[in-house]
Image (cartoon, rainbow, N blue to C red):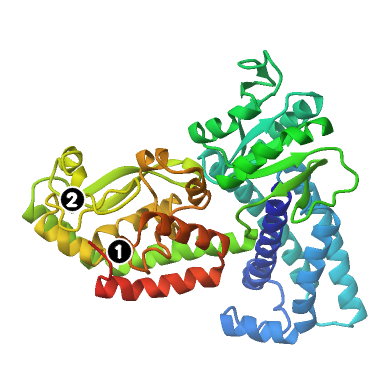
Amino acid sequence: MVKEKETFIRHIIRIIDAFVVVLSFVITYFLSDVIRNTFHLARMAYAIEPTWDGFLYFSDKNITLVIAILPVWIGLLSAFGMYTDFRTRAYRQTVGIIIKAGFLSLIALGAIIFIQKLQLTSRLFIGSFVATTAILLVIEKRLLTAALDHIHKSGYNQINLLIVGTGQRAREFIKAVKEHSNWGLQIVGLIDDEHGMFGKVIEGHRVLGRLQDIPFILHRKVIDRVIFVVPRLWLHRLDEVILACEREGIATSISMDLYDLRIAKVRQTNFNGFPLLEFETFAAKEWQLFVKRLFDVVVSLVAIMMLSPLLLITAVAIKLTSKGPILFDQIRSGLNGRKFKLYKFRSMHVGAEMRKRELQKMNEMDGPVFKIKRDPRITKIGRLLRKFSIDELPQFINVLKGDMSVVGPRPPLPVEVEMYQLWQRRRLSLKPGLTCIWQVSGRNQIPFNEWMEMDLEYIDKWSLFLDFKIFIKTFFVVLFGYGAS
C-alpha cells in the first residue's frame, strides 16, 4: 500500500532531481558569462559565446564533467537519505542534506578535475554550478512538498481506511496514520467486535459497528481499504468479512505479529513498522497507474482542443433546436462509490427525468439499467448526438478532473448501484471511464449480467495494452455508431 506508493514517488523525485542538476549545468554556463562580464574577468576556456551552440561546444570539451555531475549529485543525495522518509522529514533537514551534498560534490568534482588533469576546466564554473544546483534543489523541494500537500488537502489521491480493531496495537496504528496524514490517508471509522463498543470514540475516530456490519458500512461509506489490526485469536472471525470485501472489490490488509507468513497469493508489505498482509482484487503497479493517468490527461487535453469546433457547433445546435441548458449533469457513482457530477450534452427535452417512471414498462434492458431504443424524450438533434456518442464528449472534463478515466467501466447511477447484486459491486473497484469492453462489443444489445461480467473481466485482465486496444476500437465504434441508441 503505502510502501509501494513511496517507492514509486521516490523514483519520480530522483528523476526530477536529475533534471534539476542538468538544468543547473545549462544555467550555470550562461550565468558564468554574465558574472565574468560584470566583474571584467577573463573568458572561460571553451566558452566561445553565450548561445546554445556555444554550450554544446563547451559540453563536448568538458565531457568528463558532464558525465560525472549526475552520479555525483544523485549518489550523494541518496547517501545522505534524501529519498528516505521524504514525506515526513522537516524542510530544514532537507535543506541540510542539500548543503552537505553540495559541499561534498564540490570536493568530488574537484577531485575528478585533479585526477583527470583537466587544467582548462574553470574552478569558478564548478563553484557556480554547485551553488546554482543547491539553490534550485532547495526551491524544487519546497514546491514539490507544497504540491503534494495541496493535492492531498484538495481531496485528490486520498485513501479512505476502515480500521478493524481498537486494542493497543490498533491505537498505535491509528497514531501512525495521523502522523502520515500528508500521504493522503484518511480514517473513515473503526470496527470492534466486542459488545458495548458501538459509538465510542477511540483516538478521535468513532466505532461504526461490529464485524458483521462491515458489508453494510461499505455500502454507506466511501472505503478504499479495510485494515485489520487484530489479535491472532481473531483469525477465524475474519474469513467471511474478507470474502465480503473481496466480492465488492475492496482491498484488505491484515496487521498481525506473524513471523512466518506463508499464505498463497498474499503480498506482505509494511507500514511504519506494522507488518501487513494484502489481498488485492485489482493488481497494478504505481508506475502503470501513473502512465494511465498521464494518458488520460494528454488524451483529454488533445481531444478538447481538436474537437473544440465540434463542441461549439453542438452547443449552438442544442440551443437552437430545443429549450433548456446545453449541458446535462447527473450524479454518478465512481471509484468505490465516490459520488461525482457527470457532464453530457443535453440530448433530451427538459423534464425527461420526470417521465422516466411512466416509460418504465417500455424498458428494453434487463437489470437496474433503463434504456429505450426509440425514447420519446430524446430531441431530434439528440438522436444524432447519441448515435455517434457526441453527447459524451463533455466527459473529457470529468477525466481531466480525475473523476473518470478514458478507459474503464461506465459510471452507474447511485440508484442502480443500490440494486446491484454483491458480485456486481466489484465493478466499482476501478475508476469509471468513457469506454470499456461493453462499449466496443455491442452496448445496448448485450444483457445486463453479461455487461457486468465484461467489466469484471476488464478489471481482472487489466493492462496498459488492453486500455490502448479498447481505445483504438472505440474510434471505429463511434465512427459507425455501432450499438448506440
Checking the image for residue 326, the label placed there is 2
Checking the image for residue 219, the label placed there is none
Residue furthest out toward the top: 196
Q: Residue 288, position in %: x, y?
A: 60, 64
Q: Quadrant of residue 40?
A: bottom right
For image coordinates 66% across by 60% down, the residue present is 12
Callout 2 amino acid: Ile
Q: Residue 183, position in %: x, y?
A: 65, 42
Along the horizontal axis of the image, is 276 left or right of 406?
A: right
Q: Which is more toward the observer, 483 or 103? A: 483
Residue furthest out toward the right: 115
Q: Quadrant of residue 75?
A: bottom right
The answer to whether 401 is drawn above or below residue 190 in the figure is below
Q: Which is more toward the observer, 473 or 66? A: 473
Rate crowding at label 2 as few (under 14), some (14 to 19) or many (20 or more) other CA atoms within 10 Å: some
Callout 1 amino acid: Gln
Mark 1 lies on residue: 445
| SS at circle 1 | helix
The answer to whether 212 is drawn above or below residue 107 in the figure is above
Rate crowding at label 1 as few (under 14), some (14 to 19) or many (20 or more) other CA atoms within 10 Å: some
